[in-house]
Amino acid sequence: MPRIVRFAGETGPRYGMVDGGEVAVLEPHPFGPHGPTGETVPLEGLQLLAPVIPSKIVCVGRNYVDHAAELGNEVPAEPLLFTKPATSVIGPGQRILYPADLSDEVHHEAELAVVIGAILSRVSPAEARRGIYGFTAANDVTARDLQRSDGQWTRAKGFDTFCPLGPAIATDIDPHDVGVRCLVNGDLRQDGTTRDLVFDVPTLVSYISQAMTLLPTDVVLTGTPAGVGPLVPGDTVRVEIDGIGALENTVVERSRTVDPATN
Ligand code: ZN
């Protein structure tokens, strides 16, 4: 099952394909013409990075019936879209910075993320399916109190570090039959399956593309199953998706002295 990772090389980020305990380096990147360099590096000890830096992240709210119900909402008749800025992305092992000066209710949301591999504008679901590069895991970290009080979701969903992505892009999983789990300090909080998605992946990608062009590297978050709940500084949060792997991050309270660029 092909899995693509992005990792810190000596001179900057590099891409490679996981092959057992090795990573076969490819250049320049998988979102255009590329090929193997012939070089391999051991997977163990590599610093994995977010597998993409998207131009935009488009998210879908209330796309699992049980999650909509737990927050007292109906499932919408059409996909409910919002976005997160590219600056919210962090990779495996990076720290989620808890904005305690503005929020005291930050939640985890484990989600299957779609990585777009083509320019998609006003495409059909069938065309959308062909334009998908692969799938990764995401944590749609959300300041739930600000989501309620702001009346719309940009700030609550958009803090720096509120979009962990990774650890790999799986290119041939069935996106409609994988388990999506979230563990906090080892305790299982969310245990869902994408079999329960309200709107399936090609439908979502097609729907989004009727409004905005999706570009290679763009990411679509497909919604979260039931079990969302609070994170607090000191927690370790782990999103697991079958066939993709585990995305683990720790939570620390941000301070005025923390520079997100060096997180
Ligand atoms: Zn979400």
Image (cartoon, rainbow, N blue to C red):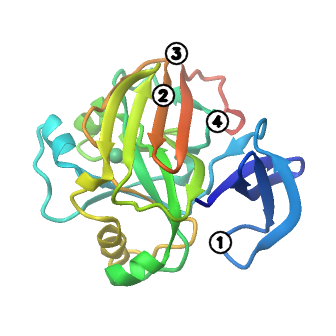
Whether residue 71 is visible here, answered yes or no, is no
Position in image of residue 263 (x %, y %): 67, 32
Q: Label 2's element? A: strand
Q: Which residue is mark 3?
A: 234
How crowded pointer 2 is (Cα within 10 Å; few <14, some 14-19, many 20+) is rated as many
Q: Could you tell which of marks 2 and 1 lies nearer the N-terminus?
A: 1
The CA span between labels 4 and 3 is 18 Å
Reading the image, the residue beneath label 2 is 237
Residue type at mark 4? Pro
In the rendered image, the vertical position of residue 88 relative to residue 232, given as above or below: below
Query: From where the camera sits, is residue 27 visible?
Result: yes
User: Which amino acid, mark 2?
Assistant: Val
Given the current orientation, which residue lies at the most extreme top position? 234
Residue at mark 3 to residue at mark 2: CA–CA distance: 10 Å
Q: Is residue 43 above or below residue 194?
A: above
Q: Pick whichever of labels 2 and 4 is earlier in the sequence.
A: 2
The amino acid type of the residue labelled 3 equals: Gly
| Observer-nearest of 117 and 23 | 23
